[in-house]
Amino acid sequence: MHFSDESQQPDASQSFLDAIRQLQLTARRSGQRRVLLLAGSRDWCIRSASRALDTLPLSDTHWFSDAAPAGAASSHGGAALRLLGTEFDALVFDAWSGFDPDAFGALSGTVRAGGLLLLLIPPLREWPNIPDPQNARVTVEPHSPEQLSTRYIKRLAGILATDPDLLHIEEGKSISMQATRPEPMAVSEEPVEAPYRTADQKRAVEAVRHVVTGHRRRPVVLTADRGRGKSAAFGIAAAQLISGGCRKVLVTGPGQESVQAVLDHARAMLPGELHAAIEFVPPDVLVRAPQAVDLLLVDEAAALPTPMLLALLKQYARIAFATTVHGYEGTGRGFALRFARMLDQHANSWRTIPMSTPIRWAPGDPLERLTFRLLLLDASAAPDHSFAQADYSDYTIEQLDRDRLLNDPDCLDELFGLLVLAHYRTRPLDLRHLLDGPNLSIHVLKLAGHVAGVVLLAEEGELEVSKNEAICAGISRPHGHLLPETLAAHQGLCEALQLKAMRIVRIAVHPAAQRHGLGTQLVRYVAETSRKAGHDYFGSSFGATYDVLHFWHRSGAATVRVGFQRGATSGCHSVLILYPVSLAGNELHARARAHFSGNFPHQLSDSLKDMDVDLVMELFGNADAAGLQPDEADWQDARSFAFGRRELETSIGALWRVTCFASTDKACISRLKPEEITLLVARVLQRHSWQHCAGLIAAKGRAEALKVLRRAVGQLISYYSRDE
């Protein structure tokens, strides 16, 4: 369709009104959503959007803007995520307030079938030249938001300029819309009866019910894009099971609001007296205090920490998971890959049920397609077969020119797809950091013509001397300088603030190309790059798991700090690792490592009391034994405990020093049995009760656990060649 009425302002012209009505008519007839792009001055955009909403017969509208008209339902900032689960006939997304990729991804899903999303932007050609309010989230000191590059906005503008289905109205210009495809309302290819909406949903419900009626420890995993009815499938299955006699179905997830749809669907199908049979319980409560249930439903599983999911999987024999494949919080595909490995190890058997047919709107929805393109939600790492015949000695590592990357969509797709695959919390905002982060550089390892590895590096340090005191006191936190700030504020190493550092923000190797040493080659490349650039040290910070930490230690890193709280998203304690690459860096590294080695053993009976045994031993194996050497009196007390009848409680100080010292010696610890190591850590270092420790090794009680612990201490004494 083409409209032209240049003699009038578009927000008042008849052609404007006709175009808006035609756009909504197309949306309603197709059962899809449509996009109205209003580009111009901010006042014009607000006025035109108001005019459009007043023209159409709409019952529910919402503005995501900090300049919404008086009286309009509106929100801004972090409120976007609180709107999940709601639906609107029209949503106004005001990019003049700043284009927040996470908010756009979340809110695009709130527009119901037949509805419109109104996107307000500056004129397309001018947009990249207008500082975006969201720049403040991407910038780092000493850069100002106005200094940021405009690659991300240029990419958005290019996609919007070529989208064939949106209606683009620009201030002072003729109104035009590409020919649209008013497809008829789609129906499922396989007819289904109520309460199901699609054959996908019916299969999903049957699979969830079978978790309860079939053999134990055979979970099911529902995977779907948003709007496919997976939460409804959970609710329907729960209602049917409760109606059939199940007394207790629990639902968990990242928060009650994120799983409310499951509860609503279930209770809508149940009489009031049975509503109490299904309820929400936070995941940490389920882990800490296991309950007897007929079925546990875990919705939005990819948003939960992996250790928490593993704990739930181990503790509940009847369990089903659901996760979003693409979503505002990032993709679930990387999660699905790692979760599959976990299920293979800890479930008798399991199955995944993909749900592809949309329920909330018809297939081929233009708004969903546009959202995927804008946010790169459908980014895909190179196919596994790309590396099937690869020569792993024939690879290249190079720094990418980000301007060129912007014009190489295939490389950008493989690059971002690999980051998504490797890190379960990759978000749409990360793409903006990738393209515009002022201190960021991108380095890729290419193998057989494809992206097989990637490392993102951030320049940090060399901060203003005048800020030292405030940073070291924890009063000031300079944005974008994680390594020096952490070393200064948490370890008193203020010299780190003036040194030049490089932080590894992300590092990933394609799953199909792993186990060939490529990760180690990337670390060596970073070391050489950092050295050539005149850095003093480089390092990284991440949620610690045994496998990841073991990789870094094997690559030559030293752990210099462990966070005392578990991360809200990872469920793991964060660790900070360092590599020195200059004389000053060596001095900093030595001090940081000594600080860690002196504090870590004491943290184990305090903030790290619940740290996993294998992680404790991996950290000890990287600690400095200096200062932990037991004296002869300690060894004598240890002998009295191991080979005599002395109680642990009267020798705990000596046993603690002996255990700490021996734990730094991997050759010594390798001689012990797993249950012996477990008791040394849990009873001697973490000071857990005998009852708790006996449970860890499946011992009958204190006496049996004590016998194992005496044997463990005896092994330590024997290793160091002392007489019994």
Image (cartoon, rainbow, N blue to C red):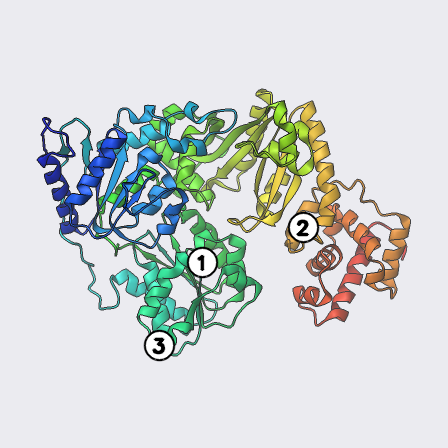
Instruction: Judge by depth and name the residue closer to the eye, 650 or 273.
Output: 273
Q: How many marks?
A: 3
Q: Can residue 275 be seen in this snapshot?
A: yes
Relative horizontal placement of residue 357, taking residue 686 as reference (left or right): left
Q: Which residue is mark 2?
A: 616
- State the residue position of label 1: 253
Question: Residue 195: where, in percent of width, then height?
Answer: 26, 68
- Give coordinates of residue 546: x percent, y percent: 60, 48
Task: Please tell me which of labels 1 and 2 falls first in the chain.
Answer: 1
Residue 556 can be seen in this image:
no
250 lies left or right of 615: left
Comparing 71 with 343, the one in front is 71
Q: CA distance from mark 3 to mark 1?
A: 23 Å
Note whether 366 is above or below 415 in the view shown. below
Q: Is tag 3's residue or tag 1's residue first in the polypeptide sequence?
A: 3
Image quarter hosting the C terminus: bottom right
What secondary structure is found at the residue carrying circle 1?
Answer: loop
Q: Which residue is mark 3?
A: 243
Determine the residue positioned at 66% across, 64% down: 696
